[in-house]
Image (cartoon, rainbow, N blue to C red):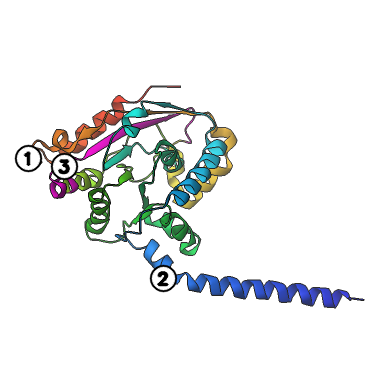
Amino acid sequence: MFSALHIAFAAFAVMALAGLLGYVKYRSLSGAIANATTCGYVAPPPSAAMTASLRRLARALVFIQVGKIKYVGLENLRNIEGPCILSANHPHWVDAVIMPLMLDQPARYMAHGRVMQSLGGLLGVYLSKRGVFAAQDNIKDGGVRTREAGTQMLVSGQKVVIFPEGLTNFSPAIDDLRPGALKIAREAAIRLGKPVYIVPAYTRYGKYPGKWLAKFDRQTQFFMVFFGFLFYRRGAVVTVGTPVSTHEFYGPTLNERTDDEAMALLKERLLSLDPGRM
């Protein structure tokens, strides 16, 4: 007959063993964590199986957070051959998981370094295997490592997803764009000796959390919106525009226009896709 003391001791032993095994496993992943959270690290391309698992997760999260999504002009993205950048507005954290549902093949996704560092870097390991790579704001190299990683991916023929606003703004307005996506496309076009295309897309939600969330840190913002899904689950419309070549952004020699002029054109293309209030 087991006494309460025996049961308590057995339970403690099991928890201690589980904790020890978990720690050993975590330590064994230290190299993978270091790679996944390193700005500029280019992991091997995701396999079809990893891409399928990412899409399953994305489908579940979109169902919970958004509900039904209507896609307009999706053929503009799926019919383009060769490398390209899918560049969309960024009003909501769920934008990042809508993108894999739009692509019917393995792709790469630029994510903020804090995302990759979540859960002690374990989330970064999971995402890295599925095509996500880290961009770090705290590395003061002018974005060189991030852009080089993106350029390598394009030159090798892959599709890359980049949100040119950088961070979410929780509203239908588009904030100032960062030049990274355009610089990556331009450099890839120079190395390939041919135009590279940026495919613009605009996501319009039925309800937005609002810019008041900006006073909270990013992790708190995520949890407030995620667990408040009943307030924001009002569907969305994603409109995909026609591809725009680097020649159109920068001119035939890729030197006729500045980054600021190219960003103005990209912002104009993004805003032109807004279907208006749902």
* SS type, badge 2: helix
Residue 217 seen = no
Image quadrant in which the N terminus is located: bottom right
Give the spatial CA distance, label 1 vs label 3: 14 Å
Residue at mark 1: 253
Residue at mark 3: 259
* SS type, badge 1: loop
Closer-to-camera residue (147/83): 83
| Residue at point 23%, 37% (across, down) | 197
| Mark sitting earlier along the chain (2/1) | 2
Hey, what amino acid is under mark 2?
Answer: Gly
* SS type, badge 3: helix
Residue 175, horizontal then vertical, whole percent: 31, 37
Q: How many marks?
A: 3
Residue 276, horizontal then vertical, whole percent: 39, 22
| Residue at point 47%, 29% (across, down) | 236
Residue 62, horizontal then vertical, whole percent: 52, 38
Mark 1–mark 3 CB contact (< 8 Å): no
Give the spatial CA distance, label 2 vs label 1: 42 Å
| Residue at point 71%, 73% (across, down) | 14
| Mark sitting earlier along the chain (3/2) | 2
Give the spatial CA distance, label 3 vs label 2: 37 Å
**Dot 3 alpha-carbon crowd within 10 angstroms: few under 14, some 14 to 19, many 20 or more:** some
User: Would you say residue 79 sits in the magenta stretch?
Assistant: no
| Residue at point 43%, 56% (across, down) | 129
Closer-to-camera residue (244/105): 105
- Part of the protein shown in magenta: 188-209
Numbered badge on residue 31? 2
Residue 209 placement, left or right of 231: left
Residue 160 placement, left or right of 211: left
